[in-house]
Amino acid sequence: MEFQEIVETVGRGVDAAGVVAIVVGAALAVAFAIRGLLRREDDVYSRFRRFLGRSILLGLELLVAADIIRTVAVTPTLDSVAVLAAIVVIRTFLSWSLELEITGQWPWQKRKAPAAEATE
């Protein structure tokens, strides 16, 4: 097996892991939400959105990694690198948007300390 074939196979594997992370995360988010609704727990929707958002973020990170592996290692042409750059920019924007939705803060903003710690 050639180096390029190995790298392409690894890229496809990482791609598949990204898709699995999103699909399994979405299924678990729905299952946890249904359980929470049946138990009449509070804040089920917010927890569902956070879990689903984190699953999508993980999947996006894996998909970007797969794109980088395949583009840089297999077909390092100027066109393929330009396409990769566009994909990374779009997916990074999506990741930042999801992070903002999940946490209410941009990734570069410092997390606020809980009120109990701030008063000590």
Image (tube, rainbow, N blue to C red):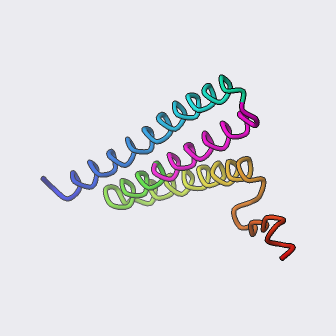
**Image quarter of the C terminus:** bottom right
Task: Kindly report the secondary structure that dominates the magenta region of the rendered protein.
Answer: helix
Depth check, front residue: 110 or 16: 110
Which residue is farthest bottom?
Answer: 120
Residue 28 picture location, percent across and down: 52, 34
Report whether 7 appears left or right of 39.
Answer: left
| Residue 113 percent location from the top left of the image | 78, 68
Residue located at (50% from left, 46% from top): 59
Residue 29: where, in percent of width, then height? Answer: 58, 34
Residue lying at 63% horizontally and 51% vertically, measured from the top left = 95
Question: Residue at (20%, 59%) from the top-left corner?
Answer: 3
Q: Is residue 78 magenta?
A: no
As drawn, is 44 to the left or to the right of 74? right
Q: Is residue 106 left or right of residue 79?
A: right
Q: Can residue 49 be found in the magenta stretch?
A: yes
| Position above or below: 84 against 16 | below
Q: Looking at the rendering, which quadrant does residue 16 occupy?
A: top left
| Residue 14 or residue 111, whichever sits in front | 111
Residue that protrudes farthest toward the left in the picture = 1
Relative to 35, is 106 on the left or the right? Answer: right
Q: Which corner quadrant of the image does residue 107 belong to?
A: bottom right
> How many numbered marks have been drawn onto this rendered protein structure?
0
Which stretch did the figure color magenta? 41-62
Examine the rendered structure and indicate whether residue 3 appears above or below residue 37.
below
